Amino acid sequence: MADKISGANFQDRRDFLKKTALAATVGLTASSLLSSSGCSATESAGAGSCRLTETNNVVLFQGDSITDWGRNRSKENTPNDSQCLGSGYVLLTAGALLDEYSNTKPIIYNRGISGNKVFQLAERWDKDCITLKPDLLSILVGVNDFWHTLDGKYKGTLETYQNDYRSLLERTKKALPAVKLVICEPFVLKCGSVNQKWFPAFDGYRDAAKKVAAEFKTIFVPFQSAFDEAVKNAPPQYWATDGVHPTVAGTHLMAKTWLKTAFGIKT
Amino acid sequence: MADKISGANFQDRRDFLKKTALAATVGLTASSLLSSSGCSATESAGAGSCRLTETNNVVLFQGDSITDWGRNRSKENTPNDSQCLGSGYVLLTAGALLDEYSNTKPIIYNRGISGNKVFQLAERWDKDCITLKPDLLSILVGVNDFWHTLDGKYKGTLETYQNDYRSLLERTKKALPAVKLVICEPFVLKCGSVNQKWFPAFDGYRDAAKKVAAEFKTIFVPFQSAFDEAVKNAPPQYWATDGVHPTVAGTHLMAKTWLKTAFGIKT
């Protein structure tokens, strides 16, 4: 179809639109245009203030298996497609944004990869983040940074996680000064693979993510609080069978929490 | 996990719960129990009044490819699982219901099959509907009943569609007297495969679905009106690339419309 969103063509179209906008705004500097791109939240404005106000704003979801969930890697350059987005919280969140912002037609990618820790995001960051030039970047990472230490195969510490996360965000801000950041809290449910060995150590990773979010003045999505509230209505495994990977109910809770925290959209 | 929802075990559990409820309510007749199962909407109560008030109420989505969308047929007896539900409007709708009704833990199935017309639903109705004993049954069918006539390979008429639909609902009500019905309006967007040949003939199928819904006093979900409104913000192909199968944006619009119409849930 003529208006189909697909990788290369769409990037061309977006560049064309940006150049057109530039040509039409003589007197504005390139940097002022850049700073107005992305969602309109000032970074310190906090919860609920994100908007996708420009045509074809790019939104990128990054993370591990919880983000990756069901996506078809061969469709990763076909933004907005259900196979590109997977069938987890990214699909539900993207659906709401694409519907809510149909007038500005956002371009939404999912580039989560199962098992990833922060250093693995860093290894593929040029290809899977910087090149896509996101206006809004949402990251959910941390559960594997702890989980994979339990069998002794991964030697990273809490300090590794925090320092790697900080470096990743510094690098991101340097390459994409206008990008708006949404940092998601790693979370677990107390069931399945999540036993007493996880605590209190895992709580440190949640705190570290929150600390990094505060340092970079990003929006912080409190997934753990949302699940802690949810288990008052149904047991942990209703929300995440193995304690880590959310069920469809958990996926909806995540999307709802993300949309409310970042955009003030109530679902 | 102990509480995992899976085919046979879950049916056993549901039967156990129903028997327990029966034993605990001596004095109530079986028929009064039956009539209180499912959503609490009286059938004539119309929009927004559905609820899933009983433990393990069964919800079934039936239809064609728009319902089927991305589901894994080998998981069709694993309700609530994302592979069972697919990645279309059923997933988004189910996510909201599973989250909203976490206290009563609904059991949600998707049994849509691509290309189906009403008579093909009828052919598999015992296996794919009656046996599941849904408390709430949502049906979206009709686009193929018209579309497949265009190349002359299917000879059914508008009258066939309406009569087949009526027969299917009569049979359903006979087998499942307490089932609550949600009839969804077939819809198209004017793009892709949908050209002038579709009109006004296709409008007759929408009208027929509405007429049947009125006859059986079911809830009627006005998808076509929702899309007609949506194209004021973005072109038809933004909502359904080929005019028939919704994009992720269209999928969200459908889930939003369904949830609002059937349950009064605003997203």
Image (tube, coloured by chain):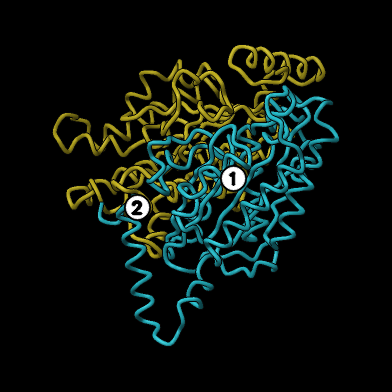
Chain colours: A yellow, B cyan
Q: Nearer the viewer, residue B57 or B128?
A: B128
Residue A210 visible from this viewpoint:
no
Residue sticking out furthest to the left: A152
A81 in relation to A191, above or below: above
* Amino acid beneath label 1: Ala
Q: Dot 2 falls on which chain?
A: B
Say which quarter of the image contains residue A22.
top right
Instruction: Write the residue at 53% across / 36% down.
Output: B113
Circle 2 SS class: loop
Indicate the position of residue B127 as horizontal and vertical percent values: 45, 47
Instruction: Write the residue at 52% across / 48% down.
Output: B125
Indicate the position of residue B118 as horizontal and vertical percent values: 63, 42
Q: Nearer the viewer, residue B116 or A79?
A: B116
A128 in relation to A156, above or below: above
Residue A79 visible from this viewpoint:
yes
Circle 1 SS class: loop
Instruction: Write the residue at 47% across / 24% down.
Output: A172
Indicate the position of residue B6 as horizontal and vertical percent values: 33, 50
Instruction: Write the residue at 65% across / 66% down.
Output: B43
Q: Residues within 10 Å of mark 1 (few under 14, many from 20)?
A: few
Circle on res. B32 = none
Q: Pointer 1: what residue?
A: A45
* Amino acid beneath label 2: Ile
Say which quarter of the image contains residue A123.
top left
A251 in relation to B43, above or below: above
Residue sticking out furthest to the bottom: B27
Q: Residues within 10 Å of mark 2 (few under 14, many from 20)?
A: many
Estimate the spatial distance between the alpha carbons at disc 2 and disc 1, rounded to whole Å.
42 Å
Asked whether, in this view, residue A139 is left or right of residue A132, the answer is left
Q: Nearer the viewer, residue A261 or A45?
A: A261
Asked whether, in this view, residue A131 is left or right of residue A97, the answer is left
Circle on res. B5 = 2
